[in-house]
Structure formats: C-alpha cells, structure tokens
Image (spheres, rainbow, N blue to C red):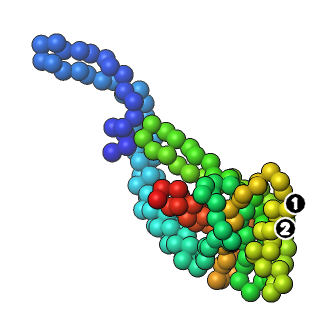
Amino acid sequence: IAVNQFPKKLSKIEFQNFRLEYEKLIQDDAYMEEIEAIVDYAMPKLREYLREGKDLYEFVEDNLLVYPVGVLPIKPTEGYMFLKEKEKRNVRIYEYSVTIFENADEKFRGLKTQYVSTCYVSVANTFEMIKVDLLRSNKNLPNPAAYAVESEIAFPFEQTFLPVAKRVLVKKISESLDS
C-alpha cells in the first residue's frame, strides 16, 4: 500500500520492549486513499504503454541495417553516421562522438551528434566517396569511423528514425570496444 511508504516521524522509543513507534507525517487518509486508487488504476495502463513502446522500438530496430563504411579505425568513438531512408537518394550526415556516463555501479554510453549536411547517394557518389570528401573537408577528425544506417521502412525521421539509429549505433560501437 502506498500510504505505508510515505515518510514517518519517530515519536516514541520503548527500550524495554525494543519497539519504535512512528507518527504519520501526512494525516489525510481520504486524500491518500484517493491517490492510491489513482495509482492502482494507472499502473496497469502505464505497463501496457511501456510494453507497446518497447515492441515498437524493437520493430524499428529490426528494420534498420547498420554497417561500417570503408575501413574502421581501432577506436571508432568519433566519426560520421550516414542516415538513409528507404527508397530515398538523400543521405543525412551527422558527426558523432561516443560519450560515457558513469555511476558507482555501471557505465552507460550515449551518442552526441551534430548535423553536418545532406547529400545524394548514387552509383557515382557512394558512401565511401562521401566519407573521402568529409575527410578532405574536416581536418578535425583525421581518422574517423563511418557507419551507414539504412531503414527498410519509412519512419518519421526526427521522432523515430534518428533516435533509434543513434541507440543502435551506440550498441554496435560498444560491441566493438568491449571485444
């Protein structure tokens, strides 16, 4: 019950019986019962929406193809991400760097991205050619990694394709760093 989880104030100590007594800090039981009823109603719906969101994420992830462009450096923590949507010729290019967040128990990786440009891919202008052009124009990244992420289904770009592509790429880079 949620009411029992709210903070309480120590009101009495019985040394003979080894007992502690607590006083409720929130006294409005009717108010607390209403909050508890709302939470009890909402939790199953929230679990369902979370499961649905997870299923949608997995569906999008399953329909993305991620592969390296050209030769990868030993440490692929900085580079370019080429995003290509199904049956479109344009490619959105992002510069990325892997960021690490740590707490006492775990290490988390994220992907910081910066939009670079949009160009067209064709037989004469392949991902490899685009990477060479980027190497020439950006001397700040002398040996960058480059990955292409292609969607097999058209998804909303900003809301779906870009965020899922970033997470999938972090997974792929993490696997290569951890091995």
- Left or right: where 172 falls relative to 145: left
Task: Give the labeled residue for mark 2.
Answer: 133
Residue lying at the far top of the rendered structure: 15
Left/right placement of residue 146 relative to residue 139 reads left
Which quarter of the rendering shows the N terminus? top left
Q: In this view, does 115 lie above or below 24?
A: below
Residue 40 visible at all = yes
- For the residue pair 68 and 164, the one nearer the viewer reads as 68
Mark 2 neighbour density, 10 Å: few (under 14) some (14–19) many (20 or more): few
Look at the numbered discs 2 and 1 and tell me whether their residues touch, using CB distance below 8 Å.
yes
Amino acid type, mark 1: Ser
Give SS at disc 2. helix
Q: In this view of the protein, which residue sits in the foreground, 67 or 2? A: 67
Circle 1 crowding by C-alpha within 10 Å: few under 14, some 14–19, many from 20: few
Q: Tell me if 19 is positioned left or right of 149 in this view.
A: left
Q: Residue at x 32, y 19 (%)?
A: 10
Which residue sits at x=18%, y=14%? 14
What is the x, y in percent for residue 145? 68, 62
Residue placed farthest to the right in the image? 137
Indicate the secondary structure of the residue bearing disc 1.
Answer: helix
Q: How many labels does the image show?
A: 2
Q: Return the x and y of residue 20 as percentages of the image width and height.
A: 23, 21
Measure the C-alpha gap from mark 2 to mark 1.
6 Å
Q: Residue at x 71, y 83 (%)?
A: 86
**Amino acid type for the residue under numbered disc 2:** Asp
What residue would you read off at disc 1? 137
